[in-house]
Amino acid sequence: MPRPRKCRRICREPEYVLFRPDGIAVRESVILTVDEFETIRLVDQEKKTHEQCALQMDVSRTTVTEIYERARAKIADCLISGKQLAIQGGDYRLCD
C-alpha cells in the first residue's frame, strides 16, 4: 500500500492561471498543478536549490526533483506543441 501524499506548503498562489498560444486554435490543454508551479518558481525564478525548495515546501528533496521534472516536461510540451497551459489543483496548503 503506497504512502499517503503529503500536502506541499505553498507561499503564494499564481496570479495568472491560463496561458495559450496566440493566433491558433487550442486543441489540447495541459494542467500544471499549483505545487508544480511553486517548484518552478522557487528553483528557476528564485534560484533556490532543490534542498532549499524542499525545506520551504515541507517535502523531501527527491520529491522536489520529481515535481520539478514533471513540471518542466509539461511546460516543454506546451511550448513545443502549442498547447494551452492551465495552473490549477494539486495537494497543497498555504503558508501561515
Image (cartoon, helix red, strand yellow):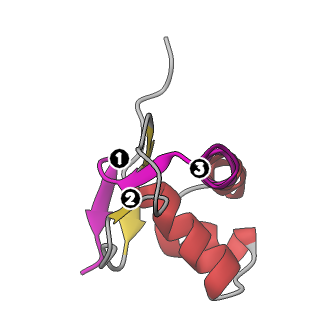
Residue type at mark 1? Gly
Is 68 in front, or is 31? 31
Q: Helix, strand, or loop for circle 1?
A: loop
- Mark number, residue 34: 2
Say above or below: 2 vs 63.
above
Question: Quick check: marks 1 and 3 in contact, CB under 8 Å?
Answer: no
| Residue that mark 3 sits on | 78
Dot 1 and dot 2 residues touching (CB under 8 Å): yes
**Marks 2 and 3, Cα distance to the nearest angstrom?**
17 Å
Residue at 33%, 79% in the rendered image:
12
Magenta stretch: give its range: 70-96
Q: Quadrant of the C terminus?
A: bottom left
Measure how far apart labels 1 and 2 are at the Cα level.
6 Å
Of pointers 1 and 2, the one earlier in the residue sequence: 2
Give the residue type at disc 2: Val
Q: Earlier in the sequence, mark 2 or mark 3?
A: 2
Using the image as rendered, state which of residue 21 and residue 56 is in the foreground. 21
